[in-house]
Amino acid sequence: MKTWMLLIPVLLPVIGGGGMYFFPIKEDRFRQCYVFGITLLNSLIVFWMLIRGVDGSFSVFHMAHGLELKFHIDGLSRVFGGILAFLWPFATLYAFEYMRHEERNNLFFCFYTMTYGICVGIAFSANLITLYMFYELMTLSTLTLVIHKLDQPSILATMKYMVYSIAGAAFAFIGFMFILHYGTTTDFVYGGVLDMSKVGGRENLLLFIFVLTVLGFGVKAAIFPFHGWLPTASVAPTPVTALLHAVAVVKAGAFAILRVTYFSFGTDFLYGTWAQQIMMGFAIVTILFASSRAVKEIHFKRRLAYSTISNLSYIIFSASLMTPFGLKGSLAHMVTHAIMKITLFFCAGAVMHQTGKEYIYELKGIGRSMPFVMGCFTIGSAAVMGVPMLCGFVSKWAIVTAAVRTQIPLAFVGMAAILFSAFLTAVYLFSIVVKAFFRTENIVEPVKKEDPNWYMKLPIAVLSGMMVLIGVWSGPLMQLLEMIAYGRL
Amino acid sequence: MEKMIWIPILFPVLGGLILSRLRGMEQNRTARQIYIMTVLTAELALVFLFMQQKGSALRVFPLVDQIPVYFRIDEISMLFSGLIAVIWWLSGLFALEYMKHEGHERSYFVFYLIAEGVLTGISYAGNLVTLYLCFECMTLLTMPFVLHARTRKSVRAARKYMFYSIFGASMSLGGIVILAIYAPSIAFQPGGVFTAEVFGQHQTLYLCAAGLMIVGFCGKAGLFPLHGWLPTAHPQAPAPASAVMSGIITKMGVLTSIRVAFYIFGADYLRGTWVQTLWMTLAVLTIFMGSMMAYKEPSMKRRFAYSTVSQVSYILLGLASMTAEGMTGGLLHVVFHAVSKTTLFLMSGAVIYYTGKKKVRELDGIGRQMSAVILCYTIASAALVGIPPLSGFVSKEFLAHGVMEAGIPILNLLAPVVLLISAVLTAGYLFPITIHGYFPEKGEESYETISIDGKMLIPLLILGVLSVILGICPGRLITFAEQISELLL
Amino acid sequence: MDVIRNFPFIGIFFCMSSGVVNSVLPGKWAKKVSITAVTLNLVLSAAVLYYVIVTDQSYVYVMGHHPAPWGNEIRFGILEGIFATFFCMIMLLSVLGGIRRLEEDISEKRSNLFYVMVNLVMAAILALVYTNDLFTGYVFVEIMTIGACGLIVVRGESRSLVASVKYMIMSLIGSGLILISLSLIYDLTGHLLMSNIQEAIAQLVESGSYMEPLATAIALLSVGIAIKSALFPFHSWLPDTYTYATSTSSAILSSLISKAYIFLLIKVYYRVIGIQVIFQNKILHLLFAFGIAGMIMGSISAIRQNDLKRMIAYSSVAQIGYIYMGIGMGTTIGMLAAVFHMMSHSASKSMMFISASGLSSVSGRSCRFTRLRGAAHRNKLAGFAFLIGSFAMIGIPTTAGFISKVYFAQAAVQSPSNVKMIITIIALGISTILNAVYFMRAIIVIYSPVQEQGNHAKRKDTLMTAVLICFIVFNFALGLYSDIVVDYMRAGLAMFS
């Protein structure tokens, strides 16, 4: 496979989507076919490339000294790329139904599709400048999606999102500059690229910069105290929240942290240092804070947003362990959480779309009128809680065992935090399930079934099935992730 | 035959699922009743059939990290699965009539059957992960019992149940993870999986894991400090469900702690450590506290629930003493208490069904109205108090000896004293019902006899007879229990 | 080929003389002459640049027949060539882009005066770029001041008048300081030609005598130029000036005039005082501090503005802060970053002023945000140009602004002073965020969809369209192919002294 083909899955959605801006499509049906066609085609191309593999990297052009735009496919690319390629078509399908009654759909789907290409660009980036550039572009392209409704809350949410994101990127940029100077290259190489002869006696400085970089990228990954944009952004239409703020954007932040930790600064340099403790500390605090906050939250989507924040820090915590097992746990949770959280958001969105109910206290007895949606919500909740035989248990197990293996005291605290968070998850997620199915004292029979149509049901069903499948048959996936975590892929 | 261990586990589950789908079952009560009793009887037969297959094992599929879902039939499995099947049959029969009063019959029985399967799964579990899997499923699938009434109170009670259980399970998971990495094996072996050498290497770690797991799992058994859910949840469930919850599901907590203490760690390594002291202390505390609370409690079912808290900790005390006699006593009490407590709750069910009375002080003259029922109740109470020649006396005798032999400093003397006090209190909170039942205070109102439906009377009679028989000739059971103790100590 | 050596002088001379001629020509003719002059200079400068690159050395051109140290000299190397060409190009684009607006803003009678000013300013810029004589530099600094004032006031509004007066006062203070500094230097060294002065100063430094007067001279010169180029805290004249001048004038002022002053400053540092001496001097710390303060304060003020042009003006204050921060670093790479940013900022800022005028002309000639809502949909190209300019200011990769940030950050990372490194990187971060806040807010306003699209009958402004397209292309080119430019700049700096 020629390396220039790496550009195709990046550019195809961008050009396809961008085309919609200049040649707007008025007809709904045609637009749906077009958008879905591009998305599906791109996913197939991505999968094909991930399976076949591409040797070497493709350098697009030279921006400046030491800065060239380069793409490649390595283990991490496979994981993130796989997540995107698998979930985007489903999300698009879901979005068609959801946005049916909204305006300016043409513009919406234009940017929705372009974001796909940009995210693939992040997944396939071979060095820091490419990652950084697509990271910034992703902020810009998702801005338009958050602001879509153009009402006051949306505009405020967008400004908040933008300021946080650009602030984070600005500080991550600093880390990038330091790697540019102190590293042998800005490429991503397993084990890190720091040139120890240049680092000399300035380890503490570099550790400090590492923490800044992690916090910088961590803004998108919603590390406390920079998580504030995520719950506010849940005013956006659900397809945006589900795909972007549960899957693409936040996972991109986590992905960047993984890259910086394992492939730029390198775990040999970082293991055992105070910087590792600080990173772990932030992750633990976020886990506990977000889970607790979710319990208090009465708005359905915002509760799920806090759940996302908490789970993202599982990934960051596992990354902070700085061992191959830690990396494996991070990747596992990236995959499983993406599937679980997007399903939960889809269910919440279906409820909002069909009944207009946004708050938890309105959900009494809704299990009777929307049994399919709430049934899948139950599966999703159980999965996030970590019930065995569902995918959440598999990734949680990977993270917690990785923590125990390191024997770092703080890691045990982290394990306790994760287990406690599982308990809190039961409180804030499963209570919704209970309320939905068992608070039926005021329900008058017969109940009108309000489950959505197949556009929405299909993604939810397939993803719920995936949760069970991965939960029961996790062997191949975990082996693959183990190989990736050891740098053999 | 060996590979078919899954049958007793899945058969009731399938039975329940079919019940939920079949159209005819919703309306036609008779058909439903026949179906349910068929399933229960068949399960009873299956379980006793498989008891012959002691020693067979089945590896199903790897769940995480190459750790398989693993089932195995050994002595403990036999004891508990048999107990489950018998009690389930009896309570099921009772419920056929009782549930007419409660409504939502089909959903009750669906979960009733599925729960039986899951509990059998716990009995057969051959390693910690399988145990945890079935344990979590049990929590989720028995919640509907508490939720049955679908009122606000029941939902709150169910949530409390879920939270305590999940909290306890999360604690235990922490222990399981530690063992999964550092212990030689997490498959159960009588006497434990450790050798002195291995244990010495990470002793603190192992003991912490043990402590976590015991406290966590025993929360299901109502051990302080995780007992708070029990008095709230058990009374909310319909009476036959309370019966199995107090009678059997608490024993699942006991079972898991047996597996942890004796099949993973081994008495040799726990004896004399802070873990044992902690366990015994908590048990003593719970015994005392449970009895005190029961004595003061005006609501009948809640009084029985507190009684459960107290009585199950007798068992735990026996186990924690790690002496042959203590263990034997504990195992015996598992059976005896199950029988007695089921009787108590079924009695309360009968009372509520026919008279609607829920508080103890309302029960004047109940003995005249339902003499057979109250007779059985009296027998069971006497057994619980420990009056010879009834069953409770036998187990309490073993327990007392065992505890004194254990040789833990203060508890040596304190424990028997508490046992004595508790016995007195037990009499104090159980006998008044009998006394006021037969000799009402309020004078000679006419107490017409109420005729009790056969389906409710028969189980009560059987249980009453059992209490007597087990007291008079407990021989085979004692031998069996002693066998187990010997095996493990 | 050697005839090319005459080009700088020819260019300057032509500009000056055609400027004089313009004063008697009617408006339309003046316009044509002016544009011709600028275009001619563009061609000449390009030729010079090419020549210098090919021969890879800098040349001295003696004016008249009086050799050094008594005569006057022009000197040109790679850096001068780059900037001369670049400034000419920006001037041309700015004038062409704003021509329609000029016709609306300036009365017919006065338009020829405008073009006189344009010529004067062009000449002055080129002179500052090429001169090798300190006093000539001063003369043209004054000429440029006058020209700038003229550019502002020609609009005839009262507010322009006030702004112009403010500008004149501040600028003259600056000039005064420069003059004093110049006198001191002349006194210390006895020379006016830059190369000669450098030798003399080198001797002084070696002997260690007259250090205080020298330091004073450097300080006065730096502050003087700082005032004229609107470094914080001497920037108070800038917002009014940029806002109330016509769009071409704003573009010229922000992109060219302030940059020319800074170019002179750098030239003096390299060629008069000697870069090694400067790197030891404390004045750099002061410039650094003011630069950082300007970066932050400029952006903070920008956030509070309700008028687009004023917001852009404050943004200029911030960006000039960046340049001084680079200079104040005291390393070669810092200088390189500053020089590159001069070019990148010019390219973006002038584009932004032209596009702002495009947006306001379809919004009832107002620049207030309330009137500009949805303007980008009415004038798509101007909106897009503004968008690209904003991205450059914020520092999105693929724009030249990003490359500047990279170089500034690299200068910080490699800085020998830990304090400066930390302050710089934090300031860069904060400044990016602040820039994002106000620029993105502006973008959201101009791109918000508005229902009614009342027919704003706008005349087809093909010139502005062409100009904006050129700007956009150039910005992208600079962002994507900065390597070549930076390499030449580096070579140019190396031969600058």
Image (cartoon, rainbow, N blue to C red):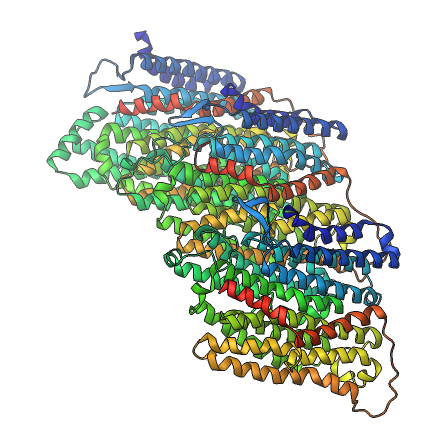
Q: Position of residue B466 (x, y in %)?
A: 71, 72
Kindly tell me whether residue B1 is visible in this rendering: yes
Picture quarter with the C terminus of chain C:
top left
Q: Position of residue C258 (x, y in %)?
A: 39, 32
At 20% across and 31% down in the image, what residue appears? C186
Residue C378, relative to residue B418: is it above or below?
A: above
Describe residue C376's horizontal placement relative to residue C302 as left or right: right
Describe residue A150's horizontal placement relative to residue A202 as left or right: right
Describe residue C456's horizontal placement relative to residue C171 as left or right: right
Residue B365, relative to residue C165: is it above or below?
A: below
Q: Nearer the viewer, residue A220 or A188?
A: A188
Describe residue C357's horizontal placement relative to residue B18 as left or right: left
At 72% across and 51% down in the image, what residue appears? B11
Kindly tell me whether residue B238 is visible in this rendering: no
Q: Position of residue B465 (x, y in %)?
A: 74, 74
Q: Nearer the viewer, residue C161 or A308?
A: A308
Q: Position of residue C389 (x, y in %)?
A: 51, 31
Q: Quadrant of residue B84?
A: bottom right
Residue B314, relative to residue A376: is it above or below?
A: below
Q: Residue furthest left?
A: C207
Q: Nearer the viewer, residue B222 or C320?
A: B222
Picture quarter with the N terminus of chain C:
top left
Q: Quadrant of residue B298?
A: bottom right
Q: Nearer the viewer, residue B180 or A434?
A: B180
